[in-house]
Amino acid sequence: MSKYVGAGKKLLQFLTPKPNVPVTKIQKGTRDLKIAGQKLKASTAKLKQTQFEMENKMPITFKGNKGKSESNREAYKRIQKENTKTIKSMLDQVTEKKANGGRVGRKFGSPKSGEKVPSKLKGFAKLPEKVQEKINKKLAKKV
């Protein structure tokens, strides 16, 4: 079966387009001439379409570009401006004191900011329950 598939590929080989890679100056010139001919065909078709629309008072399909195109320098400036804006917003988010997903501020059980935990209660939660009860029964029940 595979030999038939190979034969079919050989038979239909003429349908695939051949790549046009010019080497000499003459070949390059003919390539450029072909490209110019295609561009000419496209522009004449566009012109005929516009003339037809003007004669029949129809809306024009191909409107001219009246605006100035953006130069490389202008594009560079625009992109730099956009980039600095996004970088600035990212830096603002990082330096802001607001948290973006965690807990903001203190919870009711945590001590007020600036208030020191007494030295005898440091590491209290790590102690066994019986020892906690001996030190302070109220705190042992909370923890």
Image (cartoon, helix red, strand yellow):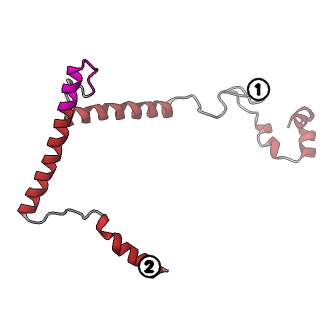
**Is most of the magenta stretch helix, strand or loop?**
helix
Q: CA distance from mark 2 to mark 1?
A: 82 Å
Q: Mark 2 or mark 1: which is in front?
A: 2
Give the residue at x 28% y 20%.
59
Outermost top residue? 57
Counting residues from the start of the chain, the first of labels 2 and 1 encountered is: 2
For residue 75, side relative to residue 122 (left or right): left
User: Image height check: is 134 above or below 112?
Assistant: below
The quarter of the rendered structure image containing the C terminus is top right
- Say what amino acid the circle numbered 1 marks: Phe
- Say what amino acid the circle numbered 2 marks: Tyr
Q: Which mark is residue 4?
A: 2
- Please state the extent of the stretch shown in magenta in the rendering: 47-61
Count all numbered tags in the image, as a single digit.
2
For residue 17, side relative to residue 30 (left or right): right
For residue 123, side relative to residue 89 (left or right): right
Report which residue position mark 1 lands on: 108
Query: x%, y% of residue 53?
Result: 24, 24
User: Image height check: is 99 above or below 10?
Assistant: above
Give the residue at x 81% y 46%.
126
* Disc 2 secondary structure class: helix
